[in-house]
Amino acid sequence: QVPLVESGGGLLQTGGSLRLSCTASGGSFSPYRVAWFRQAPGKERLFVGSITWMEGATYYADSVEGRFTISRDIVKNTVYLQMTNLKPEDTAVYYCAGMEADRGNFLYTSPWDVWGQGTQVTVSS
């Protein structure tokens, strides 16, 4: 499994925008799906959205639909999470995850094969 590395987190104010990156560091990277999850302090890790690697099909949690956009650059082995109109409730550590084959229940953490180390996003009111 190729390690995933997130970057781009930071501190910003309500209404701001931020783009996170998730890059596969070394080796051949061709997952079936890549997702973003987030985990607020004391809370469980929750699905944000995902993209299929070859088709580019996306799916989002209701809480971010219309504000967040996931895209990928196959040449750069990178998946992006563009976040707009950020709210304090978006504050969390954001993780990307890769799935090697098509498995159900991709909204949950258990089917994912590899995780990044996470990047902190803090939105102040």
Image (tube, rainbow, N blue to C red):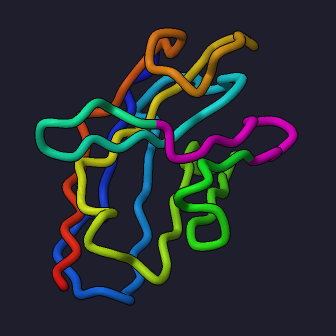
The residue drawn where x is 66% and y is 71% is: 66
Depth check, front residue: 103 or 22:
103
The residue drawn where x is 35% and y is 44% is: 38
What is the total number of numbered labels drawn onto the structure image? Answer: 0
The residue drawn where x is 65% and y is 49% is: 60
**51 w.r.t. 67: above or below:** above
Residues drawn in magenta: 47-58
> Is residue 39 on the magenta stretch?
no
Depth check, front residue: 116 or 40:
40
**71 w.r.t. 40: above or below:** below
**85 w.r.t. 39: above or below:** below
- Given the current orientation, which residue lies at the most extreme left position? 42
Quadrant of residue 109 within the rendered picture: top left
Residue 89: percent from left, percent from top:
30, 64
What quarter of the picture does the C terminus occupy? bottom left
**27 w.r.t. 65: above or below:** above
Quadrant of residue 91 within the rendered picture: bottom left
Residue 96: percent from left, percent from top:
43, 38
Quadrant of residue 7 within the rendered picture: bottom left
The residue drawn where x is 42% and y is 18% is: 114
Residue 98: percent from left, percent from top:
53, 25
> Is residue 54 on the magenta stretch?
yes
Q: Is residue 52 left or right of residue 5?
A: right
